[in-house]
Amino acid sequence: MLSFGGIPETTIRNRTGKQYLILMYHRILPSGLAKPRIQAGMYVDPETFEMQIRFLKQYFQVVSLSEKFFSNQAVEKTRSIRPFCILTFDDGWKDFFEFAYPVLKRNQVPATVFLPTVYIGTNDWFWTDRLARFLASATPPTIPELSETKPHKSLVEKIAGLQGGYEERLETAIIILKNRSDKEVKEVITGLEDRGNIGSVPVKPMFLNWEEVREMGRSGLVSFGSHTHNHRILVHLNEGEVREELVLSKKILLQEGVVDPSFIPFCYPNGNWNHRIAYMVREAGYHAAVSTVEGWNDADDSPYELKRVAIHQDMTVSREMFGCRIVNIL
């Protein structure tokens, strides 16, 4: 793999003092455990992650989100020749504690994890993971048809009958369901599980529990923020529902003692937001918010419209690919 003649490294050095980088991760998981059910864009292998951390330490000042915005130390560090980089992780997956946290401790690198509070400490799964489980467990020709009385029969049949490879079917199914109401999605997923005769999800924690969250918080390396309460896409909700997601999540984070009231960051589920929602996030008492809009941030950007660069295994498996990805070559 070519390194583009040192272009990534030169680009990073030229951005010192002008821009800063926020990286977006989801899961840190060995490839053998991730395949085939975890989408390629949703995970990074622990060995790849360790390589990426070493690269970041060489070319960046890796700081916490709170330090970037509210620390006098950050002001002093801007005189360095290396730009800021901030690590963020969406969703609060259990594997963060198992695979990412040890790497962060070994390298003494900070990170922020955004928690969907209703899922923490439970055995619940996101609907997207239940969908992936169905598609990985059953093939259309062998699945019995639903009775006419089942809700959303046509939509269930459409998803069950999708053609192509697993990842292609999963991406298509997610697109079909993403803009549906929570009630519709729940009924369709239940219908698929009934149709495939695969039963309810296994009793296996997918998300962190509160004690793991507190343990990592005590390390001083890992901080936490809100990913709403139910992980609902905010642009699909009315203002009352948006406000409830924001207020309830913040209340629980404070009650559990896992956030500093002086700086509580927020992450828009699925990256969907608009200026009205950004205003409501600020109104609810959050101090910054990250999106999925890709790119680096300028010093004068709104803290409620922060851009990130998504990192995943298939595009960043080598040092050269990672360098190109973070400077927007890949």
Image (cartoon, rainbow, N blue to C red):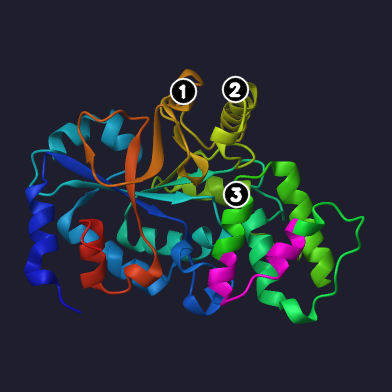
Q: Nearer the viewer, mark 3 or mark 2?
A: 3
In the figure, 108 relative to 217: above or below? below
Comparing 55 with 72, the one in front is 55
Q: Which residue is mark 1?
A: 276
Q: Which residue is mark 3?
A: 178
Q: Quick one: quadrant of the N terminus?
A: bottom left
Judging depth in this view, the residue of 255 and 276 nearest the camera is 276
Magenta part of the chain: 155-170
Q: Is 172 part of what is drawn in magenta?
A: no
Helix, strand or loop under label 3: helix
Disc marking residue 239? 2
Question: Crowdedness of circle 3 by 10 Å Cα count: few (<14), some, many (20+)?
Answer: some
Residue 312 in which image quadrant = bottom left
Dot 2: element: helix
Q: Earlier in the sequence, mark 3 or mark 2?
A: 3
Graded by Cα atoms within 10 Å as few (under 14), some (14 to 19) or many (20 or more), the crowding at tag 1 reads few
- Seen in the picture, residue 255 relative to 126 is either above or below; the reply is above
Task: Give amino acid for label 1.
Answer: Arg
Q: SS class of the residue under badge 1?
A: helix
Asked if residue 201 shows in the view, the reply is: no
Q: CA distance from mark 1 to mark 3?
A: 21 Å
